[in-house]
Image (cartoon, rainbow, N blue to C red):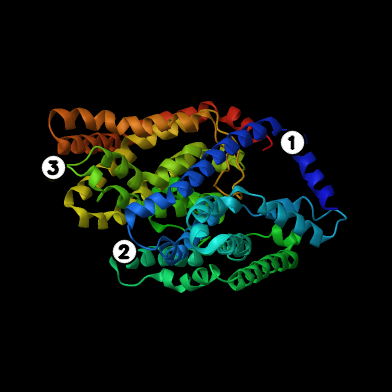
Amino acid sequence: MFFTLIRLQYLKSLRSTSFAKSLLTNILLGFLMLVLLGYVLGLGILLKSILDIAAPGDDHIALINSFMIYFFLAEFLYRYFIQKLPVIELESLLHLPIGKKKIIQMLLLRSFVSPLSIIAILLYLPFTVEVVSAQYGAMGAMTWLAAITLTSWTIHWFMLWFKQRFEDSLIGLFVIFLVLVLGAGSSYMGWFNLGEIMKPIFDFSLTSPIPLVGMLAVMIGAYFLCFKFYVSNAYLEDLSEEEDVRFVNQSIGFFSRFGLAGELANLEWKLIIRHKKSRTYLMLAGFFLLYGLIFYKNPAYSTEGTGIHWMFVFVGIFITGIFMLQYAQLFLSWNSANFDFFISKKHGIEGLVRGKYLLFMGVSFLCLLASIPYTFFGWQLLLLHICCFFFNVGILMHLIIYFSLWKPKPMDLNKGAMFNYEGVGAAQFLMILPMFLAPYAVYLPFAYFINDYAGLLALGIIGLLGLMAFKPLSQININRVLSNRYEISSSFRQEL
């Protein structure tokens, strides 16, 4: 029966109208995954050399054990965004005369066959062979690596349960992220090493198989927790039930002042909150607000006096416009399921486009406010973010939307954002050019011939001029949608 289910899934993919596109996409993703796994393996090979430089003279095994908890916290976070749930597949199988438990077992085991399941092995295997086996022998090396691997696999099964059980709550994810940041900061400052909690377990695994047995029991428990939950909740009426998301029906009162565009901006906000893919973009925008921590205090980007490094312009554009840069790339694809509704309404298309403009400007302004704490690193960063914000909403927003209107494609909003290329076409790759080049086309001439601040002021002034000319600039994109509305509507009816 297990192989019968695998065969059914294979035939479903083979007979799909988008088989060729899916095949090419999978080949590309497979190549990228091999490259990423190669980087992980390369990092594992260089791990001993890195530790020799970072902590010369220390016991490297004990050091890794003391920081192992941070690796697993980070794994929890990236699995949350990347790891897919087998729920969608259940909808196409539950009506068949096949035992529900067998379907669940097949889907869970198939989800385990993933590159994510071997990341821990690739990262720590070279270090195990080179260092651990030399000090603790082959048995100690095997039990240590097995304990790490089983912990990673436990997170896999736990994540399948966690994402389905608490899909609409960000509290658990926020707590894990907060523990990771505060724990890493506390260790860096020398206050408290959170890794001491799990360190004895991995230390003990070097000399005894008892921790390995315990980890195996925990992994099996996590699997049965996940299996029992899916069996108990695998009903078509539950899977098709509307999501009960907090704040789902709440509007942003400020938008109501802008007439039809404000109403549709509120409607777009509810769309974002209700669906998985759009919520993921919103969450990523929050995480990427921390992007400046990588650059602003990095000695490699320091400048003499209080100048602005040219790379900071990209960082400022990214921080103040990250949601707009991501979400606007799929400008009309978000509304592919109900695009005909806007066509049938008077001023529907114009209200839809202006509502999206309003939403992008509002969220970008919130990102600007959230970036104010970077002023702690220097007042010039506040000036940088303000000028970048004006350029984002005055110029770059129109450019990204213009490119996104080139042959938009349909999209399923209930699917995750990671490694999901629905709605993505050649335009989404081409718009990378204006995102990178447009700010520097304005900034660099003034920065080169005058100074950095002249370049920033040029960005801000050009952005303000774009805001003053908002109506004619936005009308260009509105006219493009109106002139191609029937072609766009036809493309949105294509089967994904």
* Residue at the spot of label 3: 304
Q: Is residue 325 above or below residue 442?
A: below
Identify the residue at image location x=71%, y=64%: 230
Q: Mark 2 points at which residue?
A: 188
Relative vertical location of residue 138 with respect to residue 300 in this rendering, above or below? below
Q: Circle 1 is placed at which residue position?
A: 16
Image height of 389 relative to 436, above or below:
below
Disc 3 + disc 2, Cβ < 8 Å: no
Q: Residues within 10 Å of mark 2 (few under 14, many from 20)?
A: few
- Foreground mark, 2 or 1, reads 2
Q: Are marks 2 and 1 in contact (CB under 8 Å)?
A: no
Foreground residue among 66 and 441: 66
Q: Earlier in the sequence, mark 3 or mark 1?
A: 1
Give the x, y percent position of residue 440.
28, 31
The first of marks 2 and 1 along the sequence is: 1
Categorize mark 1 by other alpha carbons within 10 Å: few (<14), some (14-19), many (20+).
few
Classify mark 2: helix, strand or loop: helix
